[in-house]
Image (cartoon, rainbow, N blue to C red):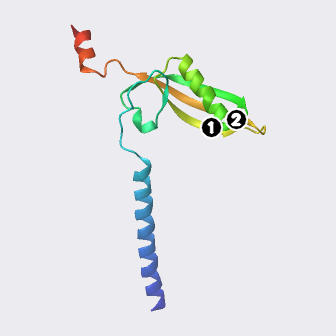
Amino acid sequence: MAIRKRERVMRRFAALILVLLLSGCSALQGTPQPAPPVADHPQEIRRDQTQGLQRMGTVSAMVHGSPDDALAEIRAKAAAAKADYYVVIMVDETIVTGQWYSQAILYRQNTLNNSSDRKAISE
């Protein structure tokens, strides 16, 4: 009798864990959001905001200092490449203490996104 009760508890516990895992997966997959309006400097965006943007390439930076220094270097490289947006992939300390490595993907506004642009190109 105690074994059956334990089996029931374990089944309910397994079902609860499965539900929590599945709901956790959906929380990680964000619904696509529009990117903010283009500014005069590159803006950091999230991965779910890249829909409709044109990928330009990747940049990386290795600096001595802090993670903020690595991100500042990424911002400077994005500005030099004339990117509208960038997504930081990673910022991590290397084996050398105080040396930081960062990597980002650069994006620009796709000029074919606007219907007026499409109309002008087709004419």
| Residue at 45 percent of width and 92 percent of height | 1
Name the residue at the front extreme: 40
Amino acid identity at mark 1: Val
In the rendered image of this protein, does residue 46 appear above or below residue 8?
above
Tell me the SS state at disc 2: strand
Mark 1 burial class by Cα count in 10 Å: few <14, some 14-19, many 20+: some
Left or right of 58, for residue 63: right
Image quarter in which the C terminus is found? top left
| Residue at 45 percent of width and 66 percent of height | 17
* Lower sequence index among marks 1 and 2: 1
**For mark 1, what is the residue?**
91
Tell me the SS state at disc 1: strand
Q: Which of 18 and 68 is in front in this view?
A: 68
Give the quarter of the image for residue 14.
bottom left
Residue 89 position, x and y percent, is 55, 35
Res. 100 mark: 2
Q: Are marks 1 and 2 in contact (CB under 8 Å)?
A: yes
Mark 2 burial class by Cα count in 10 Å: few <14, some 14-19, many 20+: many
Give the quarter of the image for residue 84.
top left
Distance in Å between CA atoms under marks 1 and 2: 7 Å
Give the quarter of the image for residue 74.
top right
Left or right of 119, for residue 75: right
Res. 70 mark: none
Q: Nearer the viewer, residue 5 or 44?
A: 44
Name the residue at the bottom extreme: 1
Residue 71 position, x and y percent, is 61, 32
Left or right of 123, for residue 13: right
Q: Which of 81 and 38 is in front in this view?
A: 38
Amino acid identity at mark 2: Trp
Residue 73 position, x and y percent, is 63, 26
